[in-house]
Structures are given as C-alpha cells and as structure tokens.
Image (cartoon, rainbow, N blue to C red):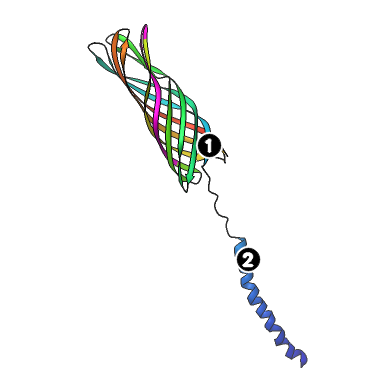
C-alpha cells in the first residue's frame, strides 16, 4: 500500500519539470540557429587605382579660307591612373576623384587637297561622385572638370592647345575584397572649341569624346 501511494506523488514533479524544460530547450534551439546579421560593405576610405579602355574622339573642324567643314573621328586605346575618396551615409556614397589618362590613336581627312590630322594625346578629370550601394555593389554618377590637349597638323605644320572643359558619366563598381574593387565606367568629355592657324591657314575645331573603360582600385583601410 505504501508503494502504490507514492507513485502519483513522484509523477507530478516529473511532469512539471518536463513542461518547464520543454519550452526552455526549444527557445535554446531557436537561439542557437538564429542566422547572423548580414555583413554590409563599408565604402568609406581613400583609394587609388588604374584604368584601361577605349576613347572615341570627334573633331568637328573648319579649315581654309573660305572654310571647308569636315568631321574627323579618332578612336584608340586609353589608360591611366586615378585617386579619390569615398564617404558613406547609409546606402548613399559620395566623394571626389581625380585621374590622368594617356591616349593612342589619330585620324586624318583631306580638306581642300591638304591632309589634316587630328588627335588628343591625354586628358585629365577632377570629378565629384555620388552613388547608391547595394552592399558590395554600387551604381554611381560622376561629373566635373576636364582638361586635355587638342592637336591638328598638316604636312610641315602643327598646332596643339590644352583645353579646359567638362565631363559627365556613370558607372558600376563592385568590391571583390575588403580592399579591392572593380569598375566599369562611361565618360563623356567636352573640351570646347579651338581656333588658330596651321602654317598660315585658319582653322577651327570643336572637340568631344566618349570614353569606355574598366578599372581596379585599392582602398586604404
């Protein structure tokens, strides 16, 4: 009779313990398997890098007296170096960038029986940048000042002028590590109008350019 009476008394605390321990164990399991918060890339920092690409130049030119019009196209390789700084506020990234680029390529046209060659050997920009970051990817727009040379030549004579103009463009940049990024970028550059004489013959040319390039940068963190 003593054994039969003790059995219910033992069952009650066992059931109570199971009821308390069950939710606690479930909560512990849920805590153990809670996914970690996503890591968001920080674009802030000073960076430097290099670019390579292609430049498509246009020289809208008048030559001679009376003036004869011609449009000279010069397409070629471009490569250079850049440096800049980024600041980040939430997903918004903004900063400034400067670059210098060298170009290979020229083209010629015959105007009034005279071969006329046009080229631009280099250009440089000083631009602001503003973009929207999707963690390690950023879409951005850019614009600012542009500097570069515009050269025209005929057999035995040439003229070259360094011009100041403007540039505008856009790009996509991706962080492939904590320090390195890759980018693709388009820039439109307008260096305005150049007037003068070549070997005593008057000319006038208006220069603009389309540049498509890829780049790699290193951010100092």
Q: Classify residue 74 as left or right of residue 8.
A: left
Q: Quadrant of the C terminus?
A: top right
Q: Position of residue 106 (x, y in %)?
A: 39, 17
- Classed neighbour count for the residue bearing mark 2: other residues with Cα under 10 Å, few (<14), some (14–19), many (≥20): few
Q: Quadrant of the N terminus?
A: bottom right
- Asked which quadrant contains residue 170, the reply is top left
Task: Say whether marks 2 and 1 touch (CB < 8 Å).
Answer: no
Q: Position of residue 178 (x, y in %)?
A: 57, 41
Q: Residue furthest right?
A: 2
The residue where tag 2 is placed is 28
Between circles 2 and 1, the one closer to the viewer is: 1
Q: Classify residue 140 as left or right of residue 59.
A: right
* Residue at 42%, 40% in the rendered image: 130
Up-down relation of residue 6 to residue 193 (above or below): below
- Asked which quadrant contains residue 115, the reply is top left
Q: Classify residue 47 as left or right of residue 130.
A: right
Magenta residue check for 193: no
Circle 1 sits in a helix, a strand or a loop, which is it? Answer: strand
Q: Counting residues from the N terminus, which is met first, the one under dot 2 or under dot 1?
A: 2
- Give the magenta range: 139-157
Please name whichever residue, 54 or 131, is drawn nearer the observer in this view of the structure. 131
Q: Position of residue 105 (x, y in %)?
A: 42, 19
């Amino acid at each position: 009779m003593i054994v039969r009476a003790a059995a219910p008394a033992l069952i009650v605390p066992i059931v109570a313990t199971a009821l308390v321990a069950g939710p606690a164990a479930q909560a512990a399991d849920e805590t153990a398997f809670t996914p970690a918060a996503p890591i968001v890339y920080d674009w802030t920092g000073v960076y430097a890098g290099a670019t390579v690409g292609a430049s498509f130049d246009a020289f809208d030119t008048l030559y001679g007296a009376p003036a004869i019009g011609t449009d000279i196209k010069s397409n070629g390789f471009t490569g250079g170096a850049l440096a800049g700084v980024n600041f980040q506020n939430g997903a918004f990234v903004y900063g400034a960038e400067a670059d210098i680029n060298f170009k290979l390529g020229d083209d010629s046209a015959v105007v009034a029986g005279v071969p006329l060659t046009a080229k631009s050997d280099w250009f440089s920009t000083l631009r602001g940048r503003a973009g929207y970051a999707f963690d390690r990817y950023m879409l951005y727009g850019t614009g600012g000042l542009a500097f570069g040379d515009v050269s025209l030549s005929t057999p035995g004579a040439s003229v070259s002028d360094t011009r100041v103009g403007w540039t505008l463009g856009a790009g996509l940049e991706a962080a492939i590590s904590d320090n390195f990024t890759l980018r693709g970028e388009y820039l439109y550059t307008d260096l305005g109008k150049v007037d003068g004489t070549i070997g005593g013959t008057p000319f006038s040319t208006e220069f603009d350019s389309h540049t498509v390039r890829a780049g790699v940068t290193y951010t100092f963190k």
